[in-house]
């Protein structure tokens, strides 16, 4: 049965973007699209043709079962109710995985990649990765790709982007005229059934990068960033402390990795200003202490008061060495996710439109880390954590912000927080 005849029997009227996707006979097809484009519907109808033609086995795999269900439900509805195909067997596992075997022997399974080891062992004829941008690269490369080898099965990747992650690499393969690969990218408004007023409302109310990704289907840097609120045009601003300000420091230790120290204070409105940084790999604790003291002396000459240094609590020996060098410090609050949340809250604009945290242009390493700090790809059901490595100044900032929020120095000097 040809695709056009099948679609007519189903009452499925694909729009132009979906038609172009269906017209491709590539073995590996990547469909990147904004929300409500109709990618789940298109992916389901694309593999339904395989099930009707011969005895096949196929999988819909999502980061969770809930994200794999739309494609699976579309296919089951079409096969059983609209085409009248009887199910020889239907089942659900203890883990909630669903499956259906039609009377012609074709099988379809709805699976989660939360425990990818459970995906080993079976050979399949087709694989649909549902909301694939939220799947881990490891789940695909180690546990899913090999299932297609024996039967030369085909792959459909259907997803809205999520930053510049591994899905963008698959998408690029289909743009480079690689044999057997074809890629497509569409925006929400390429679906003529979506009202223009809905698009414009989203455009007005969402941050630009988020709208571009979720509605424009664009690979942007915002999604997956730990601090998506940070925008250099808004948050990078000269903010030197006035006389009488109490300045705190946040310190993250390193030797092969950089040692990082940031100086910050809160102004009369309680806004946090990060006005200086020291960032160096390879130095000793004495080297770092000398440089911190040199900068503190320059601040003292301007009647700027030295407050507490909040340092990495896991590095006790390094903290003691720094104190012996003349920089007293105390262990910082090191709860990662609450600390990130506190910094994100500080980055938000206040009622007057100005943000609650700004960074001086001289803090080039902190600014660079803000823009490159991302969450790891999802590997399980737990909370995703930031990728370690590009976070030294950011860790120092987190320590300093949490220290400021403890208000220890503000009580001491009678200043408002």
Image: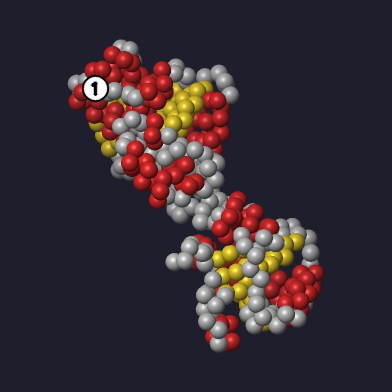
In the image, taking residue 10 as reference, residue 400 lies left or right, namely right
Q: Is residue 364 above or below residue 38?
A: below
For the N terminus, the image quarter is: top left
Q: Residue at x 30, y 39 (%)?
A: 93
In the image, taking residue 344 as reference, residue 78 lies left or right, namely left
**Residue 25 horizontal/vertical position (percent):** 44, 17
**Residue 13 horizontal/vertical position (percent):** 29, 23
Residue named by callout 1:
11
**Residue 160 horizontal/vertical position (percent):** 43, 38
Q: Is residue 14 above or below residue 257?
A: above
How many numbered circles does the render carry?
1
Extreme residue in the top direction = 1
**Would residue 74 be visible to someone looking at this image?**
yes
**Residue 350 horizontal/vertical position (percent):** 47, 66
Dot 1 crowding, Cα within 10 Å, few <14, some 14–19, many 20+: few
What is the secondary structure assignment of the residue under circle 1?
loop
């Amino acid at each position: 049965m040809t695709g056009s005849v099948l679609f007519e029997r189903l009452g499925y009227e694909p729009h132009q973007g979906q038609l172009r996707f269906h017209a491709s006979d590539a073995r590996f097809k990547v469909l990147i699209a904004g929300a409500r484009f109709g990618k789940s519907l298109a992916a389901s109808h694309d593999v339904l043709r395989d099930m009707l033609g011969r005895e096949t086995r196929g999988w819909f795999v999502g980061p969770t079962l809930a994200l794999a269900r739309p494609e699976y439900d579309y296919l089951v509805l079409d096969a059983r109710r609209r085409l009248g195909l009887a199910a020889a067997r239907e089942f659900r596992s203890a883990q909630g995985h669903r499956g259906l075997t039609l009377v012609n022997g074709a099988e379809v399974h709805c699976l989660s990649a939360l425990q990818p080891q459970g995906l080993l062992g079976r050979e399949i004829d087709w694989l649909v990765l549902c909301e694939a941008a939220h799947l881990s690269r490891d789940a695909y490369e180690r546990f899913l790709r090999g299932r297609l080898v024996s039967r030369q099965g085909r792959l459909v990747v259907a997803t809205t982007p999520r930053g510049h992650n591994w899905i963008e690499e698959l998408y690029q393969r289909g743009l480079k005229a690689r044999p057997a690969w074809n890629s497509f990218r569409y925006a929400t408004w390429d679906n003529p059934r979506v009202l223009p007023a809905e698009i414009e409302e989203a455009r007005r109310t969402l941050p630009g990068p988020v709208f571009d990704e979720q509605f424009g289907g664009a690979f942007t840097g915002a999604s997956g960033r730990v601090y998506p609120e940070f925008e250099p045009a808004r948050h990078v601003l000269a903010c030197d402390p006035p006389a009488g300000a109490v300045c705190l420091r946040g310190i993250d230790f390193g030797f092969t990795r950089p040692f990082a120290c940031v100086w910050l204070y809160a102004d009369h409105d309680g806004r946090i200003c990060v006005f200086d940084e020291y960032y160096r790999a390879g130095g000793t604790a004495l080297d770092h202490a000398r440089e911190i003291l040199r900068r503190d002396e320059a601040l003292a000459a301007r009647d700027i008061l030295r407050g507490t240094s909040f340092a990495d609590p896991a590095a006790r020996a390094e903290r003691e060495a720094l104190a012996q060098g003349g920089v007293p410090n105390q262990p910082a609050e090191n709860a990662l996710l609450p600390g990130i949340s506190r910094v994100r809250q500080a980055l938000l604009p206040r009622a007057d439109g100005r943000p609650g945290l700004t960074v001086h242009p001289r803090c080039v390493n902190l600014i660079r880390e803000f823009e490159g700090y991302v969450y790891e790809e999802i590997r399980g059901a737990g909370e995703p954590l930031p990728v370690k490595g590009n976070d030294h100044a950011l860790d120092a900032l987190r320590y300093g912000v949490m220290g400021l929020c403890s208000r220890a120095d503000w009580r001491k000097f009678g200043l408002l927080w």
